[in-house]
Amino acid sequence: MNILAIESSCDETSASVLANGHILSNVIATQLIHEQYGGVVPELASRAHQQHILPIVERALTDAKVPKNELSAIAFTRGPGLLGSLLVGTSFAKAMALGLNIPLIEVNHMQAHVLAHFIDSPKPTFPFLCLTVSGGHTQIVRVDSPLNMTVIGQTLDDAVGEAFDKSAKLLGLPYPGGPLIDKYAKEGNPLAYRFPMSEMPNLDFSFSGIKTAIMYFLRDKTKTDPHFIPQNLPDICASIQHTLVQMLLTKLKRAARETGIRDIAVAGGVSANSGLRTALTQLGEQQKWKVFIPQFEYCTDNAAMIAMAAQFKYEQGEFTEQTVSPLPRMSF
Ligand code: KG4
Ligand code: ZN
């Protein structure tokens, strides 16, 4: 059984081929055009997807050494994401499935981030909790089976990836700033500066307050010392990262306590953050959790996770009609 999967929800065009549970290829084209604008420009993103999609799909098939006529199904990200970006992947997948006369499988991008844990071993056992942290989402998900998951906590405003990126922008760093904060934080003192952590009563998060606190902090410091940012960049980055990671882990700890679940996973672009990976590993040892952290390649947006999710659907016979259209706000 060979599945070709396509991911185009935001600013990465990706295609992957999976054969009987194994990823044979995972090709990703990242759009660099957005850097100069300090964030993803939706119209430019969909145009870049149009340029990339055919060569990326061809490369994924060539790398996997699977000819088109040996494909069993075509999977695609239906949502959530940017409408124009999703339209490119959805239309391409529909046309290809129609042309080859094979089934079409829609995948929820956030579910796919969770199911990226089934690409490699060791795999979590059900039920497990997954902290899904990306540029658009921050969720704690209770996963009872591959296709049965529930969001038990989420952000009420900004996503944590957005908090990383917006903080980086305030520091004059280019988009996406999350990986740069991570890089500078490695050299800095995480306790150099303190930022207030928002206190939500349940398992939900709020990251808009900290962004504002960082903005005022930098405004006040640079008023008296114009060189404050360049001279203290590692300490500022380490302190921001420490605060954001602590906010995530406080809620994760609470979710584990309330559900009694000890298999704990992390997924999504921000799970590439080295501060989060280290802190989660340490917390896991302390709490006697089994912690699952995906390979870097499967943390940020990629089609391998879409292929993995699609395989579970294929096994259940969950196929999609040709009348399907993208769902920018798709939930589960
Ligand atoms: O999952 P993803 O690739 O795309 C979305 O679905 O949003 O996540 C992208 C987000 C961006 O906000 C990016 O800055 C953040 O993940 N990110 C990081 C790191 N690598 C990616 N944030 C902090 N540290 C990193 N190393
Ligand atoms: Zn994502």
Image (cartoon, rainbow, N blue to C red):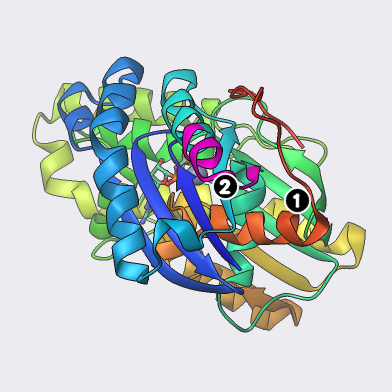
The percent coordinates of residue 293 (x first, y second) are: 55, 70
**Please, is residue 167 above or below residue 280 in the view?**
above
186 left or right, relative to 149? left
Is the CB of mark 2 within 8 Å of ligand 2?
no
Q: Residue furthest top?
A: 43
Comparing 28 with 185, the one in front is 28
| SS assignment at label 1 | strand
319 left or right, relative to 220? right
Q: Residue at x 20, y 22 (%)?
A: 37
Q: Which quarter of the figure is the N terminus placed in?
A: bottom right
The percent coordinates of residue 19 (x first, y second) are: 54, 71
Nearest-to-viewer mark from 2 and 1: 2
3 left or right, relative to 59? right
Is residue 104 highlighted in magenta? yes
Mark carried by residue 75: 2
Identify which amino acid the numbered label 1 is placed on: Val
The percent coordinates of residue 141 (x first, y second) are: 75, 50
Residue density around tag 2, few if under 14, some if 14–19, many if 20 or more, within 10 Å: many
Q: Residue at x 48, y 32 (%)?
A: 95
Residue 136 seen in the figure: yes
Mark carried by residue 141: 1
Residue 181 seen in the figure: no
Identify which amino acid the numbered label 2 is placed on: Ala
Question: Which of the two discs, 2 and 1, labels the residue nearer the N terminus?
Answer: 2
The part of the image, by quadrant, that contains residue 106 is top right
Comparing 191 with 155, the one in front is 155
The percent coordinates of residue 180 (x first, y second) are: 25, 50
